[in-house]
């Protein structure tokens, strides 16, 4: 029988605890909540929509607070009389009357509190019980009711102490404490909510020559949407008309907006900056890249990492153990000092035990970290990925697409001595304009930088593309055959090599750099030597990784000469001439020698290596977050996010440890103290509230940290964008 | 009646500080047209606050009594409380006057305030507004704590409750006015008022310190004009207020 799908709380969006006999759990009720706090908070916020009436729940809380204050005053007046007499008050005869009065007043004011606050608490505990979830709330209520019962009997018999203030304050504190937890839990999903809010609620659809504004849910695939400047694009689609600058930072991490023209892909949630756009919808309303990203984070929040499983194991037997201890304490103290003391002692044990601290310690930190990471375009597959990232000791980086940009640029342009550089470049650029090859683009870009305009297209006729070798065309003016391509093409075209050019070509081959030549009239006229551009933030990122104490090295399939040059540039050791299986071997070696190793790659060519590493980090996932090989997906190309993510993971694990330590230490100390019978249940309830508040606050610290270690904001994105560079909207799967 | 008057004045003058901090709540109430309706709401809200202050005061009085009974041998509890109250008030006043660097409370955690107050204060019925005032009185406020310490130093529940009630009543006029009238005064004027209020709070604090010192020394026969009577008996500290008889000393339970 397949396990029931995990339910999420209707208020905070976090997983509802699984019942311990799933097959017997009743069918999902209308609304499910993960805890009493969320149920209460939902009732409070839900009622706020009503016309000017404070929610019934909130009113209950207010009235309960009012009544509790009164009960406290009456109780203290009773204490004064009992303990100190009343120096300035009425004579002894009336004292008895006042005493009776205060006791009955206490009864009258305290019983409503039991109904107002105890009622919902009990209802929730009963609902949890029916879901086969054991909670402390039910036992708490039993303890409180017992203290009430004792006190009522005491009043009616006119002898014996009363404990109304204990019951009232405990109920108030427990309600407030649970509400506080729920509010904290809601905050962990705040980052995700912020992302969800990027999708507008309605869209402008063009139908039958008119524009109609419809809710987002009603947008269908193939609808045409009109997006005005300043608005956010509602759905994924393709530009049908006009062009505009679009800010896609939230999805790709690129801080520079990109121009999107007809045919380009745009994403829901990105912002149209300066032009009218008509977009044909390609994905349904809640099925776009942003929603997939959010679903990924929600999915990650549901997984349980190592620390979470540890906490789960402890929590499983924690509650039964506390119940046993509470009963034992109650029995022991009841036998020695009387029933009332027994009940109070047992109640104190129940109250001070804070399973919430244990249960919340890990999840809260993990959820906050996941949300924070998502806002920085770093997606984790689960809490486990976070924990493993924190334990990394070494990082191996694949060269292609991570350290280099993947688009080559012209490093050197050589012409024979005495030749006119500009003419040659002009012709080369003109011919290159006719080819979509990356090298041709690089040549055009180079020419543009040198401010040389390529010849117009109609300067060439009879264009032939020779696969694997290059282009050949006839120049209109002179009627000569012009060749642009590999040295082999030059040989085939009968072009002779000048000495200087031959030397340049030989040097390039030695360095393992690709080259392209242009030639006509039986001579090679120029040689272009290409190089890959090292991402300018690569050096900074490597330095940061070193700063984190990680052993960093580069893995590449290039020649060792090229690898050595790159290693010098980045100040890294380089393992060159590696086949794909060699990369896996290199990772195993690193793991043996140093420790857990992470692999940074672009996820396309190095999937096996990413899977073989302890943590695979894929760069440039773009909006294609379905890529499975990597535990960590970076939406953009910014290498600086890697050290940032490692720093975040380490901070998170540190906070988890702090929380768990606190939870254990507090519970042990607290329960121990409560067992001695010296702990006032009110103090116990207060301590419990403070404890869970501390855990929540400690975890939420992750949400406000600056996005880059040591910096004030997210690391600068800025991938250099050569003119006409590949449109990053498209990602070849 | 001198002491009671001083406390009322302290509340009155300190309430400008209250306006600075909690005036927003009062303003949030005043969304109904018509002066009468607004007046009613503001009064209900302030009554809620005063109720809470009085209750807290009673509890503080009991605490003071208890401390005195249990620790009376070790420490002159009343003097200690009076001194603490005085120091707190002076610090409050100094920080409100801008002479002390204000500590930025960085609460990364959750806060129930928005949920509670939005719900109760925005409601139509007076009972919700009253309850909003009750809850507001429980908000952490340095001025309230300082006066609570002062109330505790009286070591008597009734007196302490009265002290806090007087303080609360002192804050009532200004809060009601602000709530009803919106911003009656210009910004510059309000700043001036806040500064004056801050100095009044400091003055109250200094008075409390003086009284604390006097309680320590307890010179027989002489008296500080604000608190001790010219009696040889270890007098009740708030005798002058008129609630406690002249010959009443403190009877500690054996």
Image (cartoon, helix red, strand yellow):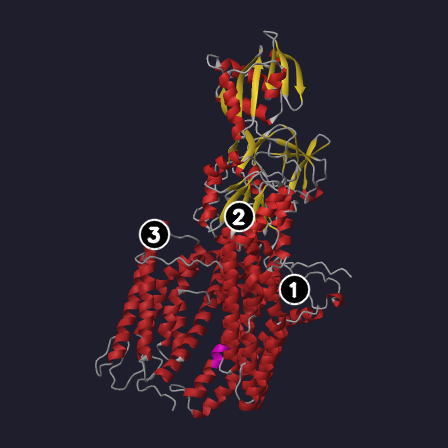
Of callouts 1 and 2, the N-terminal one: 1
Residue position marked by numbered label 1 in the rendering: A17
In the rendered structure, are the residues bearing label 1 and label 2 in contact, judged by CB atoms less than 8 Å apart? no
Taking A630 as reference, is B161 left or right?
A: left
Residue A404 higher or lower than A331, as above or below: above
Q: CA distance from mark 1 to mark 2?
A: 37 Å
Q: Are marks 3 and 2 in contact (CB under 8 Å)?
A: no
For label 3, the residue is B189
The residue closer to the viewer here, B43 or A262, is A262
Disc 3 chain ID: B
Magenta stretch: helix, strand or loop mostly = helix
Q: Could you say where residue B1 lies in the image, as x and y percent from the top left?
A: 31, 75
Q: Residues within 10 Å of mark 1 (few under 14, many from 20)?
A: some
Q: Residue at x 37, y 50 (%)?
A: B187
Query: Regarding mark 3 in the picture, which secondary structure is present there?
Result: helix
Disc 2 secondary structure class: strand
What residue span does the magenta drawing correspond to? A70-75
Q: Position of residue A62 (x, y in %)?
A: 54, 67
Picture disc at residue A395: 2
Is residue A402 among the parts visible in the rendering? yes
Q: Residues within 10 Å of mark 3 (few under 14, many from 20)?
A: few
Q: Rounded to the nearest whole Å, what is the CA distance between mark 3 and mark 2?
A: 63 Å
């Amino acid at each position: 029988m397949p396990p029931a799908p995990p339910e999420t709380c209707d208020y905070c969006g976090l997983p509802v605890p699984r019942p311990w006999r799933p097959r017997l759990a009743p069918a999902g009720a209308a609304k499910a909540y993960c805890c009493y706090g969320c149920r209460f908070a939902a009732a409070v916020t839900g009622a706020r929509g009503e016309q000017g009436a404070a929610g019934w729940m909130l009113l209950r809380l207010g009235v309960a607070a009012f009544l509790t204050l009164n009960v406290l005053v009456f109780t203290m007046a009773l204490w004064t009389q009992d303990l100190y007499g009343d120096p300035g008050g009425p004579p002894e005869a009336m004292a008895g009357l006042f005493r009776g009065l205060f006791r009955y007043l206490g009864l009258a004011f305290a019983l409503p509190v039991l109904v107002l606050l105890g009622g919902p608490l009990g209802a929730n505990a009963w609902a949890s019980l029916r879901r086969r979830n054991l909670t402390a709330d039910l036992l708490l209520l039993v303890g409180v009711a017992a203290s009430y019962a004792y006190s009522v009997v005491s009043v009616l018999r006119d002898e014996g102490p009363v404990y109304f203030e204990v019951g009232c304050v405990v109920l108030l504190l427990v309600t407030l404490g649970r509400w506080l937890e729920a509010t904290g839990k809601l905050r962990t999903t705040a980052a995700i909510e912020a992302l969800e809010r990027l999708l507008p609620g309605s869209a402008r659809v063009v139908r039958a020559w008119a524009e109609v504004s419809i809710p987002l849910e009603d947008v269908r695939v193939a609808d045409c949407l009109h997006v005005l400047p300043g608005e956010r694009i509602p759905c994924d689609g393709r530009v049908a008309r006009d062009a505009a600058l679009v800010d896609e930072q939230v999805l790709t991490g690129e801080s520079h907006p990109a121009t999107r023209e007809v045919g380009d892909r745009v994403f829901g949630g990105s912002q149209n900056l300066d032009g009218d756009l008509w977009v044909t919808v390609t994905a349904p309303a809640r099925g776009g890249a942003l929603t997939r990203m959010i679903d990924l984070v929600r999915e990650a929040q549901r997984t349980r990492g190592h620390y979470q499983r540890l906490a789960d194991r402890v929590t499983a037997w924690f509650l039964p153990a506390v119940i046993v201890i509470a009963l034992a304490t109650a029995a022991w103290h009841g036998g020695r000092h009387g029933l009332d003391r027994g009940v109070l002692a047992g109640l104190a044990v129940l109250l001070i035990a804070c399973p919430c601290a244990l249960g919340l310690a890990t999840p809260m930190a993990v959820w906050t970290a996941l949300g924070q990471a998502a806002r920085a375009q770093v997606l984790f597959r689960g809490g486990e990925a976070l924990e493993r990232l924190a334990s990394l000791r070494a990082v191996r980086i694949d060269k292609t697409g991570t350290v280099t940009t993947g688009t080559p640029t012209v490093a050197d342009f050589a012409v024979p001595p005495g030749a006119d550089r500009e003419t040659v470049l002009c012709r080369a650029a003109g011919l290159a304009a006719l080819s979509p090859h990356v090298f041709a683009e690089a040549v055009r870009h180079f020419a543009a930088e040198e401010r040389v305009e390529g010849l117009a297209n109609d300067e060439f006729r009879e264009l032939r593309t020779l696969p694997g070798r290059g282009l050949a065309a006839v120049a209109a003016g002179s009627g000569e055959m012009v060749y642009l391509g590999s040295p082999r093409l030059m040989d085939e075209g009968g072009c002779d090599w000048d000495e200087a050019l031959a030397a340049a070509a030989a040097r390039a081959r030695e360095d393992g750099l690709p080259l392209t030549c242009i030639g006509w009239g039986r001579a090679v006229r120029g040689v272009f030597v290409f190089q890959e551009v090292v991402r300018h933030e690569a050096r900074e990122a490597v330095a940061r990784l070193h700063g984190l104490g990680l052993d960093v090295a580069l893995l590449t399939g290039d020649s060792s000469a090229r690898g050595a040059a790159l290693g010098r540039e980045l100040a890294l050791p380089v393992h060159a001439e590696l086949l794909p299986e060699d990369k896996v071997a290199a990772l195993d070696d690193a793991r043996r020698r140093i420790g857990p190793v992470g692999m940074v790659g672009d996820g396309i060519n190095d999937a096996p290596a990413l899977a073989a590493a302890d943590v695979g980090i894929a760069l440039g996932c773009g909006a294609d977050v379905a890529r499975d090989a990597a535990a960590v997906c970076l939406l953009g190309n910014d290498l600086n996010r890697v050290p940032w993510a490692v720093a975040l993971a380490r901070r998170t694990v540190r906070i988890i440890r702090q929380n768990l330590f606190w939870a254990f230490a507090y519970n042990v100390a607290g329960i121990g103290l409560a067992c001695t019978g010296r702990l006032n249940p009110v103090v116990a309830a207060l301590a419990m509230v403070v404890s869970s508040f501390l855990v929540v606050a400690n975890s939420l610290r992750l949400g406000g940290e600056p996005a880059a270690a040591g910096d004030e904001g997210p690391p600068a994105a800025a991938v250099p964008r050569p003119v006409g560079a590949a449109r990053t909207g498209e990602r070849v799967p | 009646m001198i002491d009671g008057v001083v406390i009322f004045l302290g509340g009155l003058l300190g309430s400008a500080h209250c306006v600075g901090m909690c005036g927003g709540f009062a303003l949030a109430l005043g969304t109904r047209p018509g002066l009468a309706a607004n007046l009613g709401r503001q009064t209900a809200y302030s009554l809620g606050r005063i109720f809470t202050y009085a209750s807290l005061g009673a509890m503080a009085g009991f605490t003071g009594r208890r401390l005195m009974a249990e620790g009376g041998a070790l420490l002159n509890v009343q003097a200690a409380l009076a001194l603490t109250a005085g120091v707190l008030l002076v610090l409050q006043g100094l920080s409100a006057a801008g002479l002390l660097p204000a500590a930025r409370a960085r609460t990364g955690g959750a806060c129930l305030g928005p949920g509670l107050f939005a719900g109760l204060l925005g409601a139509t019925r007076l009972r919700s507004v009253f309850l909003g005032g009750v809850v507001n009185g429980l908000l952490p406020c340095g001025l309230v704590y300082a006066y609570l310490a002062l109330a505790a130093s009286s070591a008597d529940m009734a007196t302490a409750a009265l002290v806090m009630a007087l303080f609360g009543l002192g804050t009532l006029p200004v809060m009601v006015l602000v709530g009803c009238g919106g911003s009656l005064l210009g910004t510059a004027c309000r700043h001036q008022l806040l500064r004056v209020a801050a100095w009044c709070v400091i003055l109250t604090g200094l008075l409390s310190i003086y009284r604390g010192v006097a309680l320590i020394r307890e010179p027989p026969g002489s008296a500080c004009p604000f608190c001790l009577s010219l009696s040889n008996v270890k007098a009740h500290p708030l005798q002058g207020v008129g609630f406690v008889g002249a010959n009443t000393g403190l009877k500690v339970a054996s």
